[in-house]
Structure formats: structure tokens, C-alpha cells
Image: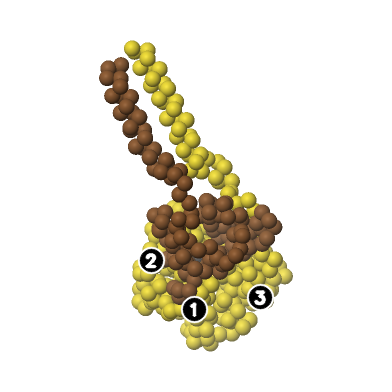
Amino acid sequence: MNNSRRSFLKAAGLSVCALSGGIADVAGFPAAARAGIAPGRYGKGENALRAKRWAMVIDTRKFCGPQDYEPLVEACRAAHNVPHIKGPQEIKWFWTDSYEHGFPDDMNEHLNKNVRESAYPLLCNHCGSPPCARVCPTQATYQMEDGIVAMDYHRCIGCRFCMAACPYGARSFNFKDPRKFLPDPVPNPAFPTRMIGVVEKCTFCAERLAAGQMPACVEASQGRILFGDLEDPDSTARQALAAGYSIRRKPSLGTRPGVYYLI
Amino acid sequence: MYNAKAVVAGIIIFVVLCTSPFWAGRTGQDYKKTGIVPPGDEKNCVENVTFMRAQHMRLLNEWRDEALRKENRTYIAADGKKWIISLQNTCLKCHSNYKDFCQKCHVANSVDPYCWTCHIIPGENK
Ligand code: SF4
Ligand code: SF4
């Protein structure tokens, strides 16, 4: 009796093991699933613009006041279906603010009036050491090979750790369904919207670079914003940096921002 | 064993009940029953139809990761044809009839993917 119970349990245990292995196989969980399901191959588009590290150089000397940045802000909104929401629940990809707010660690009280009183365009800095990507528990925020700090909204759980980590206020949370604040039809039907409960931010227009286009704000700036490879000394961005005096936001934090301001 | 008959019968009934969804799924239900209208007179999707019917969601997941994380936004299919990786701008250009294609099948299979909270359904504006 005892003996047969023992062998019954053994057989039962083994079959459960085998069965669950089989089920996992059907559901596609074993190693094979991670290796990729598609029979085809992946690649980059022929026109795709590439760089080792994308960076932006904004020539603030060529802008006079916030109204000059308005077309750029609108170009960004239109390209990415960024809704207009007033107040603290505002969604910001590319916006303007004062010198004091943008560069609070500059202790120079006697900075010239022009620099101190100008408006500055602010956006995600696509940091070289992005704190937002470090804290994201789901890897919804990550740094790509070309330095762009990107987001996969599918994975964002809305915990907002990244918003606490970003020292630049470059991230916005969708407190409400953003579609309710977008015109109908949306400005750019080729680009998705976001949903309630996810965080969003500037993408350095990764989707436009992939199609061979410059970022929307760069295009709208008519040459006043340069965009190029920071690791290529011949790029327009590097040449502009070599020729003028540039600053970055809160460099002492060690985030290595990729957005430079010529002043 | 005591009451061997009843015990064995009980075990068999239990196993059949537990696995009934699997058996029900094998009774020859076919995608045609959902009444979906495939687009145009194409014979293939990006890959062949049987693969797409069974695996389109896994393919889409893989496309998403390749495009968003590795910036591989082009897919070269098994037949050598090149596709731009985009649900909204590639898939939905062909599958432009959301109600009679995506929706019918998803409803029939009781799945509720939330693609459309962000991706824009063709013909609708947002
Ligand atoms: S600016 Fe903020 S959101 Fe952008 S990469 Fe740096 S830490 Fe992240
Ligand atoms: S809010 Fe989203 S992106 Fe930000 S840390 Fe949480 S999961 Fe990551």
C-alpha cells in the first residue's frame, strides 16, 4: 500500500512537471520566445540620420524674447500631438522660462542684463548619465545607442519616479486623458497620442531622424538651433560650440546634458 | 483502493472539466466565423497569413522593441520585401477597416487590446 502510494506520488509529480513544461512551451515562454518570433530581419532606414551622440546647440543670441520661440513650441506640439493644458497639469516637451529658472546654479549677480532677462527654451537634455533612466523600475525610460533618452509608453506604469529624478522638470504626467485636450483631428495623424497615467517628454524627434528629417524645433528655428553629432568634430553642432561661448543647465549635477545654449 | 470506481470516475471527470477549454478550442472553430473582412485582394500580410493570424501580437511586440529601443525601424520580411515598422502608418494603412477587421476578431475572441488609447484608428480622428 505504502509502496504504491509512493510510486503514485512520484508519477504524479513527474507528470505535473512534464505537463507544466509542455504548457510553458505552448504559451511560448522558453528561451526560444526571447530570441524573436519574426522570420524576417531588422534594419535601419536608408535615409536614417545617425550619430554617436546626438546633441542640440541653441543659439539664444539670435532669438529676441519668448515670442520668437513660439513657432518652435508649436512645431513640437503639432509634430507630437502634445495637448494644450493650462496650469500645473501642463504637458511640456519644449517650453520657455526665465534664466533664473533655467539656470538656477549660476551665482553671478552681475551677469549682463541681456543674458539675465532673456527667455530660454527648455526641453529634455537627453543627458549622458540620465537619472530618469536609472530610476525607472520598468525600463520604460532608457538610453539608446545614439544618446537619445527615449520612452516606451507601453511599459510606463506611471509611478513618476523619473519625474522626481529629472532635475530639469522635463517630464510631464498625464493626469487626464490627453485626447480630450487635442483638436479633432489631431495635428499629426501619423503620430500616436499618449494615454492617461503615463509620463511623457521630448524624444529628440527620434521618429523624424529615422526618416531622415531634422527634429521639428530645429527645422522651425531656421538655422538658429543646430543639431548634430557631439562626437564628430566636424558636425555643425561641434563647430558652433567651438566658435562661441556655451552653457548647459545645472552641469554640476553630473547628468551631462546634451542641450547647449550659446549666450 | 477503496471505492476505486467512483474515485477513478471522479478523477476523469475532474481532468475533463479542467481541460475543457482546450478541447473546446479544438472543435474546428475557424477565423472565418468571426465574419472579418480581410483587406483588398492581398494574399499575404507582411508575412504569410497563417503566421500573422497566430502571431501578429507577438510580431507587433517585437517590432515595438526593435523600433523603440534599437532604432531598427525597417523590417525585411522573409520574402525580402521592406516594411517601415509602424502600427499606425504601415499596418493600419492596409487594415483600414477597424470595425470589420481588428474589432470583429478581438470581440469574438474576448480580447481587449488597448492599442487605441494612443494609436489612432483609421477613419477616426483620435
Ligand atoms: S533632462 Fe530629465 S528627462 Fe531628460 S534625460 Fe535628463 S534627466 Fe532624463
Ligand atoms: S513613470 Fe513611467 S517612465 Fe517614469 S519611472 Fe515610472 S514607469 Fe518609468
Q: What's under tag 1, amino acid-wise?
A: Pro
Q: What's under tag 2, amino acid-wise?
A: Ile
Q: Nearer the viewer, mark 3 or mark 1?
A: 1
Q: Please determine whether, in this image, residue A97 is positioned above or below residue A36.
A: below
- Cα–Cα gap, marks 3 and 1: 33 Å
Protein chain holding label 1: A
Horizontal side of B117 relative to B54 (left or right) equals: left
Q: Are marks 2 and 1 on the same chain?
A: yes
Q: What kind of element bears circle 3? A: helix
The answer, for residue A63, to whether it is visible in the render is: yes
Protein chain holding label 2: A
Q: Which residue is mark 3?
A: A240
Note the chain letter of the brown one: B
From the image, which quarter does the C terminus of chain A lie in? bottom right
Q: Which residue is mark 1?
A: A187
Q: Are marks 3 and 1 in contact (CB under 8 Å)?
A: no
Q: Please determine whether, in this image, residue A19 is positioned above or below residue A142.
A: above
Q: Position of residue A82 (x, y in %)?
A: 46, 74
Label 2 Cα neighbours within 10 Å, binned few <14 / some 14-19 / many ≥20:
some
